Image (cartoon, coloured by chain):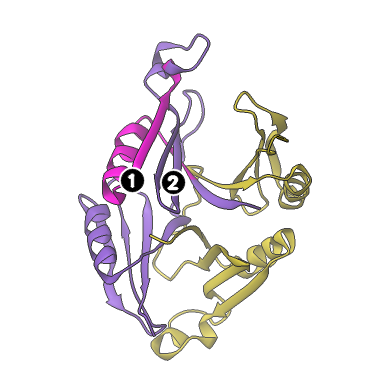
Amino acid sequence: MKEIAIYLNFDGNCREAMTFYAKCFGGELELRSFAEMPGDHPPELKDRVMHARVTKGAALLMASDRTPGTQFNPGNNFAISIQCDSAQEIESLFAALGEGGKVTMPLADQFWGARFGMLADRFGIHWMLSFEHPK
Amino acid sequence: VTEVLPFLAFDGNCREAMTFYQKCFEAELLLLPFSEAPGDFANSEPKDRILHSTLRKGSEILMAADTWSGMPHQPGNNFTVMIQSDSLEETERLFTALGEGGKITMPLQDTFWDARFGMLTDRFGIQWSFNCVVPKPR
């Protein structure tokens, strides 16, 4: 197995969300809408995103929009867990992702030796950020 | 950022799910029930619920926990855990293992992006996708 990655699904705002994430991570965004794919697509599909990825070093996040006619059922049964490089990075990334969202657990030093916090971003996606203090 | 991992939330069956995934991935499972947690955590939730769990295969590949009291558990279909592999054999094995008792939403097939790809929803309602690109011989 090369990698386990997270693939998010949005209901028409994939472009907005992935543009936001690319900015938060300072990463590179690649994005293809259905209109850019071969074949005929109904008008309601054209602006939707068929596949998008944000990459920043080892970090990878992928996403698409659902296709019309399929059910969209956003859940809270998952989060994206991020290991940060530095104390500075966890502060800035937590602040960036949380903009317009809701902090569910403020960043704090935890009993297991890490700085840790949780938030739900403006798109309803849950994030857990962690930085292990050097021993 | 050094690592991005999926963290799954269950409603009391985290142990069962992670034990199932452990078998599927042939990985090492670490489970921390509330009963074994330090300090205030230990008495904050029913003891058999899981505060934190990790699957390791070389490095960490998946994390999960049970939800806490007062946190509604709402399973969604707005995310997929994607397994990238360069081995057809491994992809087929994992697809079969994770699909046991679940539902195949797209059988493994060849795609226009030159991958073998398939999707399923497992018995715990988690969606998985499988993307296998076999390196071309030079």
Q: Nearer the viewer, residue B62 or A106?
A: B62
Locate the C terminus of chain A by quadrant: bottom left
Q: Nearer the viewer, residue A77 or B74?
A: A77
Q: Chain of mark 1?
A: A
Q: Label the purple chain with its letter.
A: A
Q: Element type at marker 1?
A: loop
Which stretch appears magenta? Answer: A7-35
Label 2 neighbour load within 10 Å: few <14, some 14-19, many 20+? many
Kindly check if marks 1 and 2 are in contact, taking CB atoms under 8 A apart as contact: yes
Please tell me which residue is depicted at 58% across the width and 52% down the height of the picture. Answer: A3
The answer for how far apart the CA atoms under marks 1 and 2 are is: 10 Å
Please tell me which residue is depicted at 38% across the width and 59% down the height of the picture. Answer: B1
**Residue A47 in the image: x percent, y percent?**
36, 20
Q: Which residue is mark 2?
A: A61
Please tell me which residue is depicted at 68% across the width and 52% down the height of the picture. Answer: B123
Q: Nearer the viewer, residue B50 or A14?
A: A14
Q: Please identify the quarter of the rendering in which residue B132 is found.
A: top right
B33 in magenta? no
Please tell me which residue is depicted at 50% across the width and 8% down the height of the picture. Answer: A40
**Residue A106 in the image: x percent, y percent?**
26, 69
A26 in magenta? yes
- Amino acid under label 2? Leu
Locate residue A63 relative to residue B47 in the image: left or right: left
**Residue A114 in the image: x percent, y percent?**
37, 78
Q: Is residue B23 above or below residue A19?
A: below
Q: Which residue is mark 1?
A: A27
User: Chain B: what color?
Assistant: yellow
